[in-house]
Amino acid sequence: MINYEGKVVIVTGGTRGIGLETVRAFKENKAKVILFGSKQETVQNAIEKLKTENLEVEGYYPNLNNYEEVEKTINEIYKKYGRIDVLVNNAGISANKTIDNTTCEEFEKIMNLNVNAMFNVSKAVIPYMKEVRNGVILNTSSMVSKYGQPAGIGYPTSKFAVNGFTISLARELAPFNIRVNAVAPGITNTDMVANLPKEMIEPLIKTIPLARIGEPRDIANAFLFLGSDMASYISGVVLSVDGLART
């Protein structure tokens, strides 16, 4: 148990998969948690789901590609709680088309959500973290940011950008005692993976030395650690959580 009592945590992309499990993990460890989602309906569904587990959280659905809208939402949260301790930039989308079949609009959409949205939310919270000279920004990268993938060029490109953003922002914000790190998940048992046929998943599992795919809680636990005082001397790190997968 890592105690986040009294701390305020924002998780983007927090309505399902890794994001929802990250919300759950921080809340179980006594944080005040605010999740962001893309739609009012999905945000409300996530809140209701957590409520059945006796976990009370708040939710918002700003357009993460609209800085003014993001800034307004962050200001509301700060006015209510008087602090923002941890930001988890988890919102993102993947891709698997070859470059021949990828439109410019599709590539732009991936970069907008995976990179530009991360910039917008980080930019909005940083003034409040600077004010108290404390805070943690955590970003969701991917194993493909290191090894690439055979198709869906936009996704690894965006995650390479996440790594560069993480390492550079960590240097920029270090004088303000604000830490910036990323978690790079491997194959993880999200809804998307669960819907894939066994004949596709089983060969992938055989490439992982730990002989299993990751669970969302494996990734959430990494965020939980990196956001805590136990990681107070760790910044600018892209932490692989992939079972030693190297594909």
Image (cartoon, helix red, strand yellow):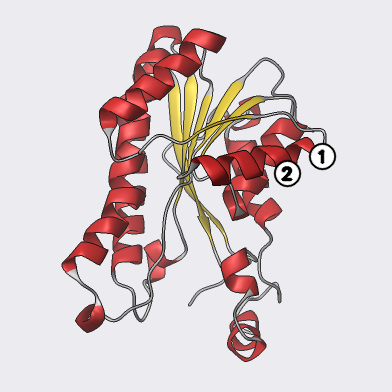
Report helix, strand or loop for mark 1: loop
Q: Is residue 177 left or right of residue 109?
A: right
- Mark 2 in CB contact with mark 1 (< 8 angstroms): yes
Report helix, strand or loop for mark 2: helix
User: Looking at the picture, how far across and down is residue 234, in whole percent?
Assistant: 51, 35
Q: 126 or 68, which lies in front?
A: 68
Identity of the residue drawn at 20% across and 63% down: 105
Identity of the residue drawn at 26% across and 65% down: 106
Q: 179 or 45, which lies in front?
A: 45
Residue at the outermost front position:
41
Q: How many angstroms separate mark 2 from mark 1 (CA)?
A: 7 Å
Image quarter (top left, top right, bottom left or bottom right) of the N terminus: top right
The kind of residue on which mark 1 rests is Glu
Q: Which mark is residue 155?
A: none
Q: Mark 2 points at which residue?
A: 49
Identity of the residue drawn at 62% across and 28% down: 33
Q: Mark 1 points at which residue?
A: 53
